[in-house]
Image (tube, rainbow, N blue to C red):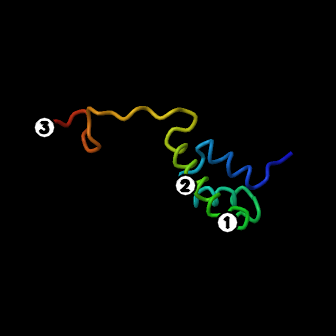
Amino acid sequence: MSLSTVERAYQLARAGEAPDFPALKARLKADGYRAVDALLASPSTQRHLQAICAACWSRPGRPSPPPSSDQGPDQGPDEGP
């Protein structure tokens, strides 16, 4: 049995397959799902899927590591004062 559009949207979001809600909708449409815009039109559904995409995109299947305190975002391992 195939998944509904909404079920597939949540499955893709949780799997880290899309970085954000617009990319998730594009993926569903590319995969042949119909009425994507209408079925995902609810603002609460959009916010929920966006939050899931954001949480799962960077580390699919793994918990995020704790933030590092020894280097700033612009410092590489060879850069120093």
Distance of label 3 from label 1 (alpha carbons): 50 Å
Residue displayed at 58% across by 34% down = 61
At label 3, which amino acid type do we have?
A: Pro
Task: List x then y, in percent, for residue 66.
Answer: 40, 32
* Three-letter code, disc 2: Asp
Tag 2 and tag 3, C-beta contact below 8 Å: no
Measured as percent of width and height from the top left, residue 39 is found at: 73, 63
What label does residue 41 carry, if any? 1
Which residue is at the front of the view, 31 or 69?
69
Name the residue that disc number 3 marks: 81
Residue lying at the far right in this picture: please name it.
1
| Residue depicted at x 65% and y 47% | 12
Question: Which label sits on residue 20?
Answer: 2
The residue located at (69%, 59%) in the rendering is 30
In this image, 33 relative to 65: left or right? right
Pointer 1 or 2: first along the chain: 2
Position of 21 relative to 63 (above/below): below
Above/below status of 5 relative to 78: below
State the CA–CA distance, disc 1 to disc 2. Answer: 15 Å
